[in-house]
Image (cartoon, rainbow, N blue to C red):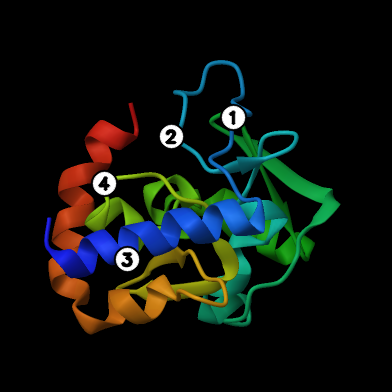
Amino acid sequence: MNKTISFLSSLVVAGIAATGLAQSSATPSGVAAHKYNLMGESVGVAGYDPVSYFPEGGGKPEKGLISISVQQDGVTYRFASEEHRTLFEKNSVKYLPAYGGWCAWAVAELGKRVDVDPESFEVRDGKLYLFFRDKKLDTRALWREKPGELLAKSEKNWPELSK
């Protein structure tokens, strides 16, 4: 591991500890441990509406409502509107975040599952990627420096991390 990645890894770990973020231990029954980044009651995308990230959903992260939700693979997804829920139900694979909602950069560079800031995201080639961000480190900016290379690393690392 080169010095830059080692330094960045240290920043990510320090940032997670400083902000009180941790890998979710809540796992719905029947779902592989650590496959999804969940909060509280097995809620995916930190309660944000996964459709809202895409152009047809407004292209801006929006909190979902408890009253408008769907369960898929043991994970509850919340939506800002009935229309968004319907879009998700018609094609959930399109709207699910890559790597179970864990930080795409960390999956690639660190080979680890790291929490995200749900407002730090990118939709690339029709897929939603989420990133860790705090005052000291913006992993989305690092991802954008070499997205092709990092995407290949993420795809290589994810099968082992999702077990």
Q: Who's the residue at 29% across and 81% down the image?
A: 144
Q: CA distance from mark 1 to mark 4?
A: 18 Å
Pointer 1: what residue?
A: 25
Which element is circle 3 on?
Answer: helix
The answer to whether residue 28 is above or below residue 71 is above
Of tags 3 and 1, the one toward the viewer is: 3
The disc at residue 35 is: 2
Which element is circle 1 on?
Answer: loop
Q: Who's the residue at 27% across and 52% down the image?
A: 110
Q: CA distance from mark 4 to mark 2?
A: 14 Å
Q: Position of residue 162 (x, y in %)?
A: 34, 33
Q: Nearer the viewer, residue 135 or 30?
A: 135
Pointer 3: what residue?
A: 8
Q: Quadrant location of residue 126?
A: bottom left
Of tags 3 and 2, the one toward the viewer is: 3
Residue type at mark 3? Leu
Q: Nearer the viewer, residue 103 or 67?
A: 103
Residue type at mark 1? Ser
Of tags 3 and 4, the one toward the viewer is: 3
Q: CA distance from mark 3 to mark 1?
A: 24 Å
The answer to whether residue 43 is above or below residue 110 is above
Q: Tell me which label, 3 or 2, sits earlier in the chain.
A: 3
Q: Tell me which label, 4 or 2, sits earlier in the chain.
A: 2
